[in-house]
Image (cartoon, coloured by chain):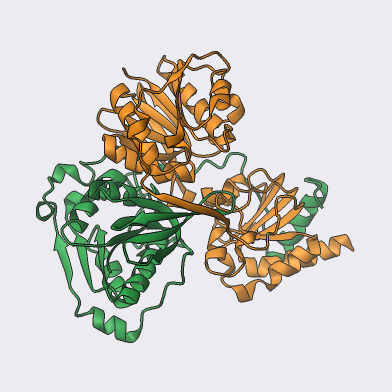
Chain colours: A green, B orange
């Protein structure tokens, strides 16, 4: 089985964020970047499926030079090759623009399955994989918590997470696009051997022209959305912060809970 | 004909709260543009729900009712909605931001060439231009977003962003959605539905909950959480990353894909407060947040907060509670 995995590099969710000087995004200077959480699970799922069937995984990502680091990590984990959509024209895209660009890149090769994460931890549109599926004309499923290739290798048995603690089991024909939910598996760690091997693996760089796209169809120019400002949420009334060392703050909190909130 | 549409999601033939919230959003959007919204309902045997929706202030209720729409699949929903959206070309189509919506709305947008604006929490009219609000960075930041270009835009509204009981009453004519249901096809075969957790812990009836997030750092660090829960007579809950890492079982999860709780006291330790978690606990009477990051969004909805290392604060809190209870 040949599997394409699309991943996004996002700010580490543990990192302290600052608003950029122009007020339109976070300040990326000194910000640590990692592979988006649900994309890591998508990669693990892809690697496991490819191993089981004797296939391979090719990873795709879109963005600046720093994205190479995420692709290199995916190669160290076991992906065979990487494709980097690296051109200023790709930057600043919404889910429609990014889905279109990734579909064009994935569509240049033959794959049985495309995996993405279900949602990015930065913009969080939760839509790029579905848009990509639309451009490929393949069936898709979002928020996938289980994948099994059925007998004959022509269909997938897919577990989709629903609200209220239930899962729906569906059957999809291949080829298909699945948007993987975090928690579906246990992502592996890179081995030293994997890290060494990754240094010899190919990271191909492509621009819009190689994908048969106009620069205006991708990135900010190809997007319907434009972020005009970002800000920390207004705190409303906000929490009463109890100061002091752990013991002092804890004691003050208990007093508040007893006398003011009357819940103890 | 331009206009504002709202596509309701039904559950067991009923209109759930989040769909009423979407109706409220569509009504407010329509009012801001001096028009009335139109509703669309899809399903099978949904006359009851259609009648209910017809008692609200809408220009029209479009109903697609038939065997082809008995079960949701993205293919069937796209098959019914794509021709209708293309023909009417509404300016906006509002959806409730549910897992089902996220499953099909982006694909429908791609198919009909609509703009795509998921998970909005509000909008403002700024000098004739609409600016939308939506969370980014897991809810740590709010973005204000402008839509460029012409044509239809799909918007999904986050749970709790618009009041479900704020729907304006009225009377709307009900008619069939202009679509050929014979051409509607599912694109996946539904094999069944299963419960996620075998043994269910019911957190919805808990009086006090101590909930932990990623900040706890590992399953081996849960001791102080258990101690605090014991001192309070509380149930233990968790946000999603704790469950995904296998530190606690899935039936302890609170949030959009877990349980929705409303205890008298909710203590959130090491939980940053992503929107997916907040929707599951914001009905709590009193919320206490303990987090090392003073900018964590959980502090914006908490009543009391302590900024610091939860591994120090939890044992101190347990001790203070034991002392207070004598």
**Quarter that holds the C terminus of chain B:** bottom right
Q: Is residue B316 above or below residue A121?
A: below
Q: Residue at x 56, y 19 (%)?
A: B168
Farthest right residue?
Answer: B326
- The percent coordinates of residue A255 (x first, y second) are 80, 54
- The percent coordinates of residue B264 (x first, y second) are 75, 48
Q: Is residue B140 above or below residue B246?
A: above
Q: Is residue A121 visible?
A: no
Left or right of residue A114: residue B314: right
Q: Residue at x 31, y 35 (%)?
A: B115
Left or right of residue B57: residue B112: left
Pick the residue in front: A98 or A150.
Answer: A150
- The percent coordinates of residue A133 (x first, y second) are 29, 50
Left or right of residue B226: residue B21: left
Q: Is residue B91 visible?
A: yes
Quarter of the image where one finds residue B240: bottom right
Farthest bottom residue?
Answer: A193
- The percent coordinates of residue A22 (x first, y second) are 32, 44
């Amino acid at each position: 089985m040949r599997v394409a995995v699309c991943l996004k590099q996002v700010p580490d969710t543990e990192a302290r964020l600052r608003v950029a000087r122009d007020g339109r995004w976070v300040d990326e200077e000194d910000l640590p970047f990692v592979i988006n959480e649900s994309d890591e699970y998508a990669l693990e799922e892809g690697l496991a499926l490819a191993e089981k069937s004797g296939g391979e995984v090719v990873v795709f990502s879109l963005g600046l030079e720093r994205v190479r680091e995420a692709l290199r990590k995916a190669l160290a984990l076991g992906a065979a090759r990487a494709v980097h959509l690296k051109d200023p024209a790709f930057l600043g895209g919404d889910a429609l623009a990014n889905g279109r660009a990734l579909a064009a890149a994935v569509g240049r090769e033959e794959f049985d399955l495309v995996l993405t994460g279900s949602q990015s931890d930065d913009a969080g549109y939760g839509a790029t994989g579905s848009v990509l599926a639309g451009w490929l004309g393949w069936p898709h499923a979002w928020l996938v918590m289980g994948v099994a290739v059925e007998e004959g290798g022509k269909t997938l048995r897919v577990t989709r997470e629903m609200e209220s603690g239930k899962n729906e089991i569906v059957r999809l024909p291949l080829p298909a696009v699945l948007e993987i939910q975090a928690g579906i598996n246990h992502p592996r760690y890179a081995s030293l051997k994997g890290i060494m091997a990754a240094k010899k693996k190919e990271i191909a760089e492509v621009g819009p022209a190689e994908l048969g796209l106009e620069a205006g169809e991708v990135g900010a120019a190809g997007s319907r959305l434009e972020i005009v400002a970002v800000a920390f949420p207004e705190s409303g009334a906000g929490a009463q912060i109890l100061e002091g060392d752990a013991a002092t703050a804890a004691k003050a909190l208990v007093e508040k809970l007893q006398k003011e909130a009357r819940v103890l | 004909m331009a206009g504002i549409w709202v596509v309701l999601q039904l559950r067991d033939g009923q209109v759930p709260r989040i769909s009423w919230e979407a109706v409220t959003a569509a009504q407010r959007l329509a009012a801001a543009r001096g028009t009335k919204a139109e509703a669309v309902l899809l399903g099978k045997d949904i006359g009851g729900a259609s009648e209910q929706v017809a008692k609200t202030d809408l220009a029209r209720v479009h109903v697609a009712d038939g065997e082809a729409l008995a079960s949701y699949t993205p293919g069937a929903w796209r098959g019914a909605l794509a021709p209708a959206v293309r023909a009417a070309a509404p300016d906006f189509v509002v959806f409730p931001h549910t897992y089902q919506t996220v499953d099909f709305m982006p694909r429908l947008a791609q198919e009909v060439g609509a703009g795509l604006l998921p998970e909005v929490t509000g909008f403002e009219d700024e000098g004739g231009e609409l600016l939308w609000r939506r969370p980014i960075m897991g809810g740590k930041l709010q973005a204000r977003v402008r839509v460029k270009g012409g044509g239809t835009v799909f918007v999904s509204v986050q749970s709790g962003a618009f009041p479900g009981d704020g729907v304006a009453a009225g009377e709307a004519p009900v008619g069939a959605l202009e679509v050929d249901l014979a051409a509607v096809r599912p694109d996946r075969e539904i094999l069944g539905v299963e419960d996620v957790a075998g043994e269910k812990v019911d957190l919805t009836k808990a009086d006090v909950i101590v909930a932990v997030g990623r900040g706890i750092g590992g399953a081996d660090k849960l001791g102080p959480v258990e101690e605090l829960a014991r001192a309070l007579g509380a149930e233990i809950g968790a946000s999603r990353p704790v469950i995904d890492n296998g530190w606690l079982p899935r039936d302890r999860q609170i949030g959009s894909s877990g349980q929705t709780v409303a205890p008298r006291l909710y203590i959130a330790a090491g939980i940053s407060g992503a929107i997916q978690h907040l929707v599951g606990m914001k009905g709590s009477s009193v919320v206490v947040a303990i987090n090392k990051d003073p900018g964590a969004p959980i502090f914006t909805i908490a009543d009391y907060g302590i900024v610091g290392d939860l591994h120090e604060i939890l044992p101190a809190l347990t001790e203070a509670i034991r002392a207070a209870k004598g």
